[in-house]
Image: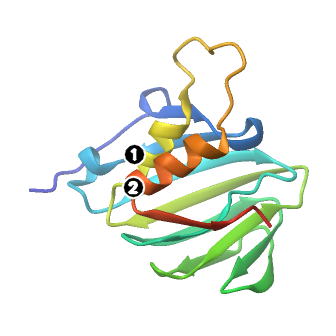
Amino acid sequence: MSMAYLAQPDQQQTLEWLDGGTFSVLLDSAATDGQLTVGRFNVSRGEAPPYHMHTREDEIFMLITGTALLWSDDKQMELSEGGIVFLPKNVPHGYRITSDTADLLLICTPAGIEGMFRQAGRDLSTPRPEGFEISPDAMAAAADAFGQVILGPPR
């Protein structure tokens, strides 16, 4: 049974993510009874995940601040501040941040994708191991474990 859930900023898990950015888990499977995941990226120019597709969930992301290039089914589009995109499961996509910094809100339904971020990323509340990085192998293993298919390198 779903219930209301409140998490103040200091109760939200923040992970080190690609290219020195962060991903904060705002709502996860446990908080939403598996209904959806909500997360927030704070990233810099050039941050780009591998070209990929989701096999389990639909994805929505909104560019709160910044600009980005977006690819979907190999079609390139520009996403400006305040822009929002819906990416159904099984649709190949990727993006690259083109502004100095960007703040992106991610919503996926159903929930579960947060497991990929937790597996490949590093919880900022723990000491940073020397030389920590999200290697292509670590990213591929986490993606595979949570229904993501990496189709190619970042764009």
Residue hosting label 2: 146
Q: Nearer the viewer, mark 2 or mark 1?
A: 2
The numbered mark at residue 84 is none
Query: Are circles 2 and 1 on residues that touch, CB within 8 Å?
Result: yes
Q: Is residue 39 above or below residue 106?
A: above
**Image location (x, y in percent) of residue 91:** 54, 82
Q: Earlier in the sequence, mark 2 or mark 1?
A: 1
Residue 29 falls left or right of residue 121: left
Q: Which residue has dot 1 on it?
A: 115
Instruction: Identify the element where label 1 is drawn.
Output: helix
Instruction: Please identify the quarter of the rendering in which residue 127 is found.
Output: top right
Q: Is residue 76 above or below residue 34?
A: below
Residue 136 percent coordinates (x, y): 65, 46
97 vs 105, left or right, is right
Amino acid type indicated by mark 2: Phe
Q: Is residue 1 left or right of residue 25?
A: left
Specify the quadrant that holds the C terminus.
bottom right
In the image, residue 95 lies at what x, y percent? 73, 67
Q: Residues within 10 Å of mark 2 (few under 14, many from 20)?
A: some
Residue 142 point in image, percent of width and height: 47, 47
Q: Which residue is at a point 54% across and 79% down the rendered structure image?
A: 87
